[in-house]
Image (cartoon, rainbow, N blue to C red):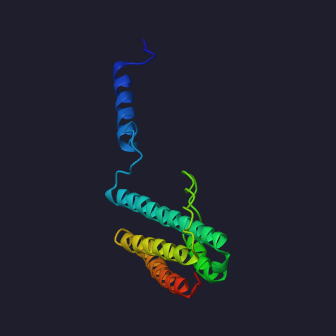
Amino acid sequence: MHRTGTTRRGALTATGAFALGAVLTGCGSGQDEPRNPRARAEAASLRARSTLRTAAARAGVSLLARYDRTAATHPLTEAGLAPLRATVGAHLAALGGPPKGGSPAPAPPAPPGGAKAALRELAAHERRVADERAAALLEADSELARLLASMAAAGAANAYLLTELAKETPA
């Protein structure tokens, strides 16, 4: 008589095959991390790059808002701020635009009462952003490091020009 149905040997073979398949594909590990060390390093590099880019873009959005607020509060400074603001806008575009998602950037504080003081405060903020970007160079990959270095240099130049503009602006 021929036996039909599942035998003990067949059940063990199927269980072993299923377990081997799970081990080989990584099922049940609950992790999305690649097992290959090189792939893990590349994934970590992409995350770090994204984090640095997002931080630089947030700083750019904040800086643009400060330029806009200063120009709106002190219309006398608008013509001098326009080319510097355009540079900041170009940097933000090079970073891929404003960051998506997350909480919106808080409104910048109102600039000081006088145009000179407002320009000095804007220069100080521009200098801080340039310093942050220069510090981020140590963590960035080569492509992003070149972009951040260029942006930091331009920010330092903008800070200098804002300081000079403050000296030329009437009280």
Residue, far left: 37
Q: Nearer the viewer, residue 148 or 80?
A: 80
Q: Nearer the viewer, residue 67 or 55?
A: 67
The answer to which quarter of the image holds residue 22 is top left
Depicted 159 relative to depicted 24: above or below: below
**Percent position of residue 127, x then y:** 44, 75
**Percent position of residue 67, x then y:** 59, 72
* Tally of marks: 0
State left or right for residue 43 relative to residue 82.
left
**Percent position of residue 145, x then y:** 42, 75
Q: Quadrant of the N terminus?
A: top left
The answer to which quarter of the image holds residue 16 is top left
State left or right for residue 121 relative to residue 70.
left
Q: Nearer the viewer, residue 19 or 28?
A: 28
**Percent position of residue 19, x then y:** 36, 33
- Residue at the location (55% across, 51% down)? 103
Depicted 3 relative to depicted 55: above or below: above
Q: Quadrant of the C terminus?
A: bottom right
- Residue at the location (45% across, 71% down)? 129
- Residue at the location (39% across, 29% down)? 14
The answer to which quarter of the image holds residue 39 is bottom left
- Residue at the location (60% across, 76% down)? 85
Q: Nearer the viewer, residue 79 or 23?
A: 79
Residue, far top: 1
Depicted 19 relative to depicted 156: above or below: above
